[in-house]
Amino acid sequence: MGIFDWKHWIVLLVVVVLVFGTKKLKNFGSDLGESIKGFRKAMNEEESKPAEQTPPPVQTAQPQASSPLNQPQTIDGQAHKVEEPIRKD
């Protein structure tokens, strides 16, 4: 028998319909469908975006302010994954 028996699934379906009602299940189904459509649309837009991106604008040299503390500072860097060997104690 087990959990994959068709009789168990029918009993489970009847319990779910009794607890939630058909109207809530219909709303749940339509909401689930809309969310899946939105997810697919977002994934398709994300895949097409890198081809459409333009390079960032080049900043022109600006005159120095009176104090270096007023200038924004950025740090360029790149993260690297460091794998450490597993020690057996």
Image (cartoon, helix red, strand yellow):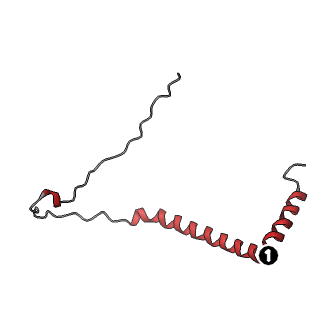
In this view, the residue in front, 83 or 88, is 88
Q: Write the residue at 17% across / 61% down.
A: 70
* Mark 1 residue type: Thr
**In the rendered view, does 12 fall on the left or right side of 84?**
right
In this picture, residue 25 sits left or right of residue 73: right
Image position of 58 (left or right of 9): left
- Where is residue 25 shown, x and y percent of the image? 75, 72
**Residue 20 or residue 25, whichever sits in front:** 20
Q: Which residue is drawn at 90% across and 58% down?
A: 7
> Which quarter of the figure has residue 82?
top left
What is the tally of numbered marks visible in this picture?
1
Residue 84's x, y, as percent? 45, 31
Name the spot of residue 63 as percent of width and height, x first. Answer: 10, 64
- Secondary structure found at label 1: helix
Residue hosting label 1: 22
Residue 33 vs residue 51, the one in the foreground: 33
Residue at 88% x, 54% y is 5
- Position of residue 70 relative to residue 22, above or below, is above
User: Left or right: where does residue 46 sit relative to residue 6?
Assistant: left
Which residue, as the protein is rendered here, is positioned at the far top? 89
Identify the residue shown where x is 46% and y is 65%. 48
